DNA sequence: CTGAAAGCGCTTACAG
DNA sequence: CTGAAAGCGCTTACAG
């Protein structure tokens, strides 16, 4: 019942361990007859290489870290964005015999590599820490803008802001409120600025609120905004969770969505889908998969990914559901 | 710049590798003076053990698998339930130098252990496959009911159904619709049956719809239900996603929630929170953490976890937000 | 094209 | 309490 080893395969096939190793690793220079013998032995024994041993012997790492900086210990389940990153990374790694190690660390916490790593994916990591991790890991790719010399892949957040506002404008909205995210988050800032620029270019005066990506704050801010500016007829929120909070505040205040006020979020994740929320779509899963491949290939540079708009019931003509 | 090894520590501390190993693994029988020397050397070099090498040498595995059976390749991001399981497992493993390997496999796919594993957490795994994996992995714990001899941890789904219906009944609802989940999912069946029993015990006649945990189906089924039974004044859905679909169908049909129709979901995850949905709360993160610890401790048995009710705007007195 | 041998970074009886 | 030695399952020059 012992797990078969490469040695067992070699014995059964009647060749040396070196030869088996070459076949497994698809290296050239093995006689076809031997190659076949080895393959048959592998199947017969149900052999699967021991990844840890391989990593140890080759000196090559077998793990990519996913470093997520968040102070909420439940962030992994509370924030659907992280699940999308995990999904993309898992998909990119699935066929590669490479493992993903998820590390959720608080903003104040230290991050040690702890084991030989191929590199790391960074989410929500501030520039200084990103620089530091780049040294520690050898190679990192940041999801979203980061430090100058750190590779990154990021959605075109500013353009997303523009898409959202243009959509609202074409829908006839003329008093558009923008609820931003944390000031420390470059993505959030770009989204807000992109939206604000479009509003001003249309000759309108924006209403601005400061959010923090949480539902509770979004509700509170929205309540205040429509209180101070009862003529607001549209809200562009920096993320879906913020948009969901706005939605709740609006309906609680008796405003009909989208008749009285239209709402557009950002992410187009599971929250937008379930709430019928128009949202700027960013391809988080695909971006995470790309970032993972960049780590494996040790690709650098800064990749920009276009975004699009998914229109649902929270905006547009009434009843176009 | 080479990563320091145990050998480096031994040399710096002036002791043998054995002694260093004993200190690292907190084994007794090391002279305090030596222990201190080793600890200082560890700090000075910034030494961290190579987990793969340790696993190889000790014969002990360093990985727990999370096997999720789902045909949707995007399930990890589309279904918030999985994120909660991952969150709980990651949390339980964080301090243990043990890694989590996520394996998303289609219902038809094969699952090979592939490496030395401590065991596996099973999600959505049918009894036959669970039995088989139990052998392959040595130890598995299923999230949700499974085969007779497979350890499991499951929320009290039937009681959740009862809680939901009793809440609706106390709220004055007398025409309660139940939308179930996939017939193949024991959790979904238990929830539905728990709800139906309560409805019948109250002397009411239930309205029943068949869902499949997806938004689109929930919308379609709800549309049909209120069409055929216009007097429906409450919906109990087998999961939050289903409840979200019901919510959309109801408002699209001009019903006010909760004034005309109350809605209760199941899970109390991020969708319920963002949609203001009353929902039966199951502690998925905690359950997953417990299941993970059961794998590590090789605990068996079937653990039942109580559920509770989180009341939000989709039920109860109008305007109690 | 092939295999014997050394070695990756650890742990663990074993002898002292 | 301590260390020398064997070994975990692999890979990789190296010599043939």
Image (spheres, coloured by chain):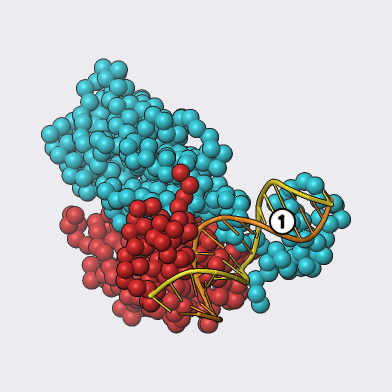
Chain colours: A red, B cyan, C yellow, D orange
Taking the view exactly as shown, the residue that stands out farthest to the right is B33
Residue A51 located left or right of residue B51: left
**Front position in the image: A221 or A160:** A160
Residue B94 located left or right of residue B4: left
Residue A58 located left or right of residue B23: left
Q: Is residue A135 visible?
A: yes
Residue drawn at the location 53% of the way across and 70% of the way down: A58
- Residue B127 found in image quarter: top left
Residue A95 located left or right of residue A49: left
Q: Is residue A289 visible?
A: no
Q: Which residue is mark 1?
A: B21
Quadrant the N terminus of chain B occupies: bottom right
Q: Secondary structure at mark 1?
A: helix
Residue drawn at the location 45% of the way across and 34% of the way down: B151
Q: Picture coordinates of residue D14 (x, y %)?
A: 56, 81
Q: Is residue A116 above or below residue B230?
A: below
- Residue A270 found in image quarter: bottom left
Taking the view exactly as shown, the residue that stands out farthest to the left is B228
Quadrant the C terminus of chain B occupies: top left
How packed mark 1 is, by other alpha carbons closer than 10 Å (few <14, some 14-19, many 20 or more), is some
Residue drawn at the location 73% of the way across and 68% of the way down: B8
Q: Picture coordinates of residue B227 (x, y %)?
A: 13, 37
């Amino acid at each position: 019942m012992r797990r078969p080893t490469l040695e067992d395969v070699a014995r059964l096939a009647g060749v040396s361990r070196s030869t088996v190793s070459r076949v497994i690793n698809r290296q050239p220079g093995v006689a076809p007859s031997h190659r076949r013998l080895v393959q048959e032995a592998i199947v017969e024994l149900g052999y699967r290489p021991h990844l840890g041993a391989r990593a140890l012997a080759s000196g090559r790492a077998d793990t990519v870290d996913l470093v997520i900086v968040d102070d909420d210990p439940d962030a992994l389940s509370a924030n659907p964005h992280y699940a999308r990153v995990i999904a993309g990374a898992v998909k990119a790694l699935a066929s590669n015999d490479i493992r993903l190690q998820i590390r959720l660390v608080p903003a104040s916490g230290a991050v040690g590599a702890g084991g030989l790593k191929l590199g790391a994916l960074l989410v929500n990591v501030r520039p200084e820490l990103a620089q530091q991790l780049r040294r520690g890991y050898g190679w990192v790719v940041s999801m979203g803008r980061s430090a100058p010399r750190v590779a990154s892949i990021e959605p075109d957040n500013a353009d997303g802001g523009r898409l959202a506002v243009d959509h609202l404008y074409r829908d006839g909205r003329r008093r558009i409120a923008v609820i931003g995210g944390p000031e420390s988050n470059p993505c959030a800032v770009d989204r807000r600025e992109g939206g604000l620029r479009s509003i001003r270019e249309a000759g309108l005066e924006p209403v601005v609120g400061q959010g923090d990506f949480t539902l509770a704050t979004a509700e509170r801010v929205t309540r205040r905004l429509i209180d101070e500016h009862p003529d607001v007829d549209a809200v562009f929120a920096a993320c879906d969770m913020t948009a969901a909070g706005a939605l709740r505040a609006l309906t609680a205040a008796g405003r009909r969505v989208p008749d009285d006020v239209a709402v557009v979020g950002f992410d187009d994740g599971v929250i937008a889908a379930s709430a019928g929320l128009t949202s700027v779509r960013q391809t988080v899963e695909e971006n995470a998969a790309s970032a993972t491949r960049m780590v494996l290939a040790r690709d650098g540079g800064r990749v920009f990914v276009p975004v699009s708009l998914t229109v649902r019931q929270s905006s547009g003509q009434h009843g176009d559901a």
